[in-house]
Image (spheres, coloured by chain):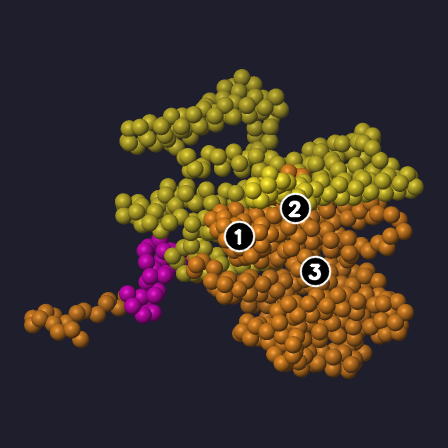
Chain colours: A orange, B yellow
Amino acid sequence: MAAQPAGTPEPLLPPRTEVGFIGWLHANLFSSWFNSILTLASGAILVLVLWFGIQWVFLIAEWSVISELGGRFLLGRYNTEAACDGQNCFWRPQAALIMVSVLMGAAWGLQSNRVARTLAWLVAGVAAAFAFLPYDFQTMGLDVRVLLLLNLPAVPLGWALARYTPMGTGARITMLGVAIFFLTLVLLRGLPGIPFLQPVSVVYWGGLSLNLILAVGGITLSLPIGVSLALGRRSNLPIVKVLCVFFIEVFRGVPLITLLFMSQTLVPLAFPEDMPQNSLFRAAVVITLFSSAYMAENIRGGLQALHPGQAEAARALGLPGWQTTLLISLPQAIRNVIPAIVGQFIGLFKDTSLVYIIGMLDVVAIGRSFIQSNPEFLPNARELFVFLAIVFWIFTYGMSYVSGKVEEHLGVGQR
Amino acid sequence: MVSSSRILTYQGIPVWRHVQVIQWAAQILSGIVVVALVVWFFTNMASAIQAREIPTGFSFLSREYQTPIGEHFLPYESSDTFLYALFVGITNTAIVAVAGVFLATALGIFIGVSRLSTNWIVAKLAMVYIEFFRNVPLLVQLFFWFYIILELPGVRESIVIADAFFLSNRGFSMPWPKPTDYSIALIWLVLAVVAIVAGALVYRWRNRMEERTGESSYPLIYGSVVAVAIGAAAWLVLSFASGNSPFFLSIPEPQGRFGNIVGGFTARAGLLVLLIGLVMYTASFIAEIVRAGIQSVGRGQTEAARALGLSPMNTLRSITFPQALRVIIPPLISQFLNLTKNSSLGGAVAYSDLTNIAVTMTQTAPAVSIFMLIMASYLAMSLTWSVIGNLYNRQIRFVGG
């Protein structure tokens, strides 16, 4: 307490309307008459929406359509008789899921931060929780339940793998991830001649797993392709530049749906007839290239925003051109446009729902075809699509949340 | 001597390490690879076309299309040609694109500004809207609205508002101006354009005067009064000369046993679903762009404006927003492009957009040619938006910047 000259009154406390809860209300909701009207109007909207929304969710909506579709949301028609021809191939996606859990655990072991740990346990926990769904043994056998529960020990296994074995370097875990991606594809597709891996045609792939496979493959490849295109567009070699500009502008100027249609009608003609054809592979390539074109523009923006002094300093220090690009320019450029890049990843994930065009039954199309073939569920279509919206939202919002954390970690906007 | 002889015998950089040589070699090599690939694709395609006798060429364009189109704004019959049907598809896409762009921009600006409101509830509501609609695939949203519209009452039990707006599972009908006589309506439209140009000129003149003298010259009021006056005068003169007004307001009303709605303008279910979905989806992106743009204007600008005594509304209108526009316009244009391209999802909700019509056409016409045509159409539309955007961008950029 500073000594006060005699005769000065005690300093007054701030008025009650400026501090505490009332102060908060005053500052944020009722600072002026206009603001008060806004508060009342928007508050009324909020109350109405909540009132009817909660009533709809708990009293009016019939969520039975979700349980009726059940596992088809995740796997489409994969676990049907037609797909597997008498064999039990339901274990294959489960095995793939366990590998993913191992990978998530390994990522946590490598990074040892909260986000990685939460994500790993979340994935494994949700997968294990599916084992307790009230389906009878005919639709979901004991073996499936056990495989689902195995996701829980898979996380610490991956963690230990990254912690206590020579696997625990970023490069090796990345290689493990790539290996697991291809192993998943092989597991789902099967290999001819191997007893337990009977081939399953890709037309039976579907559900959310199809969206995720397309998204993971597309995201992993669209970034390097986009980087090369961006560098090509900025290079001073005329032929390379023209090719890159042409590619980017054509893919950005045409809707993805049109490109997907073309991939099914025109692209097969462009290859010799005896070459093996796979409609899903073509669609995956088109989605990836489409996303790469947008990615290239995002990264070009990042490169343009970079001060030329960075590259000049690197050249002055004697770094050759490719090292200047790879070690100096690109890392900074990419760091600057992380939100745009993640936005493009989210866009790619959302665009995987367009494979309905080529007749694949992804998670949206399987819901739609279910409604169309079971008209008694027509009034429940709303519940179905609200559920699908929430499923997509969880993934996409999760992606933007993680990107925010990554930005924080890299200190974007602080340097 | 040794060193000078070395200098004399210096041959320059060896060819295989010469940067320019390497670069040109790489370029020519990549060029050759791409050309070879394209040639390979085309020979494969040509042989496949020959082997399977796939028709090619553009002669089909003058044939009769013979297929109905679900929704069309231009008069269309099955006996019309392929070319005309494609044109109908382009107008269908263009109408959705233009209407969607206007509505989405309005909604997006509204939500983007709300997102920055000092009012806590308004800001949070806007945030929830943005985070939800931006993160859910457009296709899911379209299907949601599709089944909502499907659940609406039938056309005979339409929801009626003020005896003029009808909402049913067939679509939405509203009053709409219709020309009484096409030639007179056209004359009035031309005069209306003249009125708008005159208004713009007056606006500019008053604006310059305000800048020169520093006194309020009310450019907006003067400009709009001139424009409205010329338009109204043209309307009156034309009405007196021809006996009836150029346009009349056609009000929809149910007719006959089935209660079909006649008159006005009816947005059928497909158009309605597509428009609602596209506008809600794109508005969430535009809102984020507007928010980022407004935030990019330095705090000092707002503070200075407030210190000069401008009201919050005036600060936003004449200080913050004009500066934010420079940041907003380029990404906004790319959202317009996205909206136009996303309208190709119309086929999923029973709207006959360009892609939908073209894909149906491939059953009776050469697919190669049709895809070339629709790619050209979409590229042309993209180009149109880019040109408009760049022209506007040039108007508002920093002077000398």
The Cα atoms of the two marked residues, 2 and 1, are separated by: 17 Å
Which is more foreground, mark 2 or mark 3? 2
Label 1 SS: loop
Q: Are marks 2 and 1 in contact (CB under 8 Å)?
A: no
Magenta stretch in the rendered image: A18-40
Q: Give neighbour class at mark 1: few <14, some 14-19, many 20+ (Cα, 10 Å).
A: few
Residue B261 image-quadrant placement: top right
> Which residue was labeled with disc 1?
A318
Disc 2: host chain: B
Which residue shows up at 71% across the image and 74% down it?
A: A99
Q: Amino acid at mark 1?
A: Gly
Viewer-closest of B399 and A308: A308
The Cα atoms of the two marked residues, 3 and 1, are separated by: 37 Å
**Residue A92 at what x, y percent from top left?**
78, 72
Q: Quadrant of the N terminus of chain A?
A: bottom left
> Which residue was labeled with disc 2?
B17
